Amino acid sequence: MAEQEKNFDYDLIVIGGGAVGENVADYARKRGVSVAIVESELVGGECSYWACMPSKALLRSGHAIRAARRLAGARDAITGTIDASAVLARRTAFTDHWQDDGQVSWLDSAGIELIRGHGRIAGPGRVQVEGRTYSARAVAVATGSIPALPPVPGLADAGAWGTREATSTDSIPPRLIIIGGGVAGTELAFAFSSLGSRVTLLSRTSLLDREEPFVGVHVAAALADEGVDVQIGVSPTLVVRDADGTVTVTLDGGNTVQGDEILVATGRRPSTADVGLETVGLTPGAPIAVDDTMLVEGTDWLYAVGDANGRALLTHQGKYQARAAGEAIAVRLQGAAVQDEPWGLHVASADHAAVPRVVFSDPEVAAVGLTESAARDSGIRIRAVEYDMGWVSGAKLHADLYAGRAKLVIDEDRHVIVGATFVGQDVAELLHSATIAIVGEVTIDRLWHAVPAYPTISEVWLRLLETYGRPS
């Protein structure tokens, strides 16, 4: 702001009290900045109550049963089925019964003020909440994202579930139709199948098609083994809910599928339609363009962090952006120098090169950086190597007939990894080593000195290096 008032209500107002907004506020407050968070729902946001935590709680029991069934001796101890009511109760415990008392207490302990209500920008440095206007030297938009509903006739009138309804349900439908073969669709297909639903999964493209091609093949095969009806290459053209509650979906080929509930999991879009962007010349509903410190282009006071900027719609990546942004805001307000060079303290450089992502399916999918296709499209001279994870001793011990695959994408000019993908049981814990290798630009020659313990699944790293070849 070129000309600022001398008196402000706060140094920083954060619109959105989810995990990302909390981190912006926390990291700014630690640097001595006065902060308020504006939140209209539950402090802690989508991840705490309707996404990350409850969905993984719904998945975990099924994963544990399948893991036991893959081991001789252990499988003989399984004599019953999953207690769905116990799983739902455990899920509810992870959401604190959809109460945010604990999160609010944390804000208070951190010295962050909470303003309840819907926040809208009312001009530079001004935020309106329920009829009252607050002023601040900086404002950060951290409003997250909302589901994108495809324009299928009848869908809006059929009472379709979004991911919120799915993760907070109190009952398991006998038949569930899921539209969408992305992360949420595949995860919830595993969850509800394990809890007793007969699941039909409809996807226009191969499952998880933004990842390496073998990813969707492994996940689709595993879903089929679980009894899920996976239909790929189909699109719904009509959705009707009958008087008795039955949902009928007509597909583009003329076939129909029926269920008791229908879940739409076709992606998300930034939740920026009603935050007052038009008052400062920005487009409501669109991702907010920012630099790597999360400063909105063309301003010196407005920031957008997490899903609101559309850079990487992942909770952990949004929190990473928030750590950088919170400190960048404080440093700027205090007149100090911002470390905004690539990989500097106050930038989110990893958004461009090392975004880690996990699909908690079974097998799990863990990937970071670029796929082979994306690397080639970006002009990098690469070589890719793959290895069957079932051949690794640690994997064989981990599960009988262990099925999975690993891949590295290597920049041949710099001799560093630019992408890594793992598919298999419990591979998520392998991912951080790959993330470190990419962020640290560890050369292939040096990686030969990173010795994996034997016999662990991480020995796949050695096998991938051997496939690539020893330095000459």
Image (spheres, helix red, strand yellow):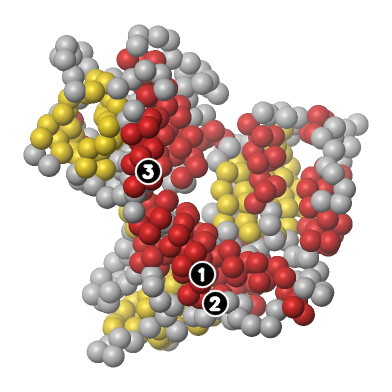
Q: Which residue lies furthest to the left in this view?
A: 131
Q: Which of pointers 3 and 2 lies earlier in the amino acid sequence?
A: 2
Q: Mark 3 points at which residue?
A: 103
User: Which residue occupies the extreme bottom position in the image?
Assistant: 244
* Residue at figure coordinates x 72%, y 50% from the top left: 407
Q: Is residue 79 above or below residue 194?
A: below
Alpha carbons under labels 3 and 1: distance apart: 24 Å
Residue depicted at 55% across the width and 65% down the height: 59
Mark 1 highlights which residue?
87
On the image, the x and y values in percent for residue 90 come to 49, 64
Query: Where in the figure is residue 68, as x and y percent of width and height?
Result: 72, 70
User: Which one is in front, 54 or 182?
Assistant: 54
Name the kind of residue labelled 2 in the image. Answer: Asp
Quarter of the N terminus within the rendering: top left
The picture quadrant where one finds residue 276 is top left
For mark 3, give the secondary structure.
helix
Q: How many marks?
A: 3
Left or right of 88 on screen, residue 128:
left
Q: Are marks 1 and 2 in contact (CB under 8 Å)?
A: yes
In the rendered structure, the answer to whether residue 238 lies left or right of residue 283 reads right
The picture quadrant where one finds residue 165 is bottom left
Q: Percent position (x, y) of residue 448?
A: 84, 35
- Give the percent coordinates (x, y) of residue 449: 85, 32
Q: In this view, does 27 lie to the left or right of 71?
A: left
Residue type pointed to by label 3: Gln
Q: How far apart are marks 1 and 2 (CA)?
A: 6 Å
- Residue type, numbered disc 1: Val
Vertical comparison of 181 with 30: above or below: below
Depth check, front residue: 8 or 354: 8
The residue identified by callout 2 is 83
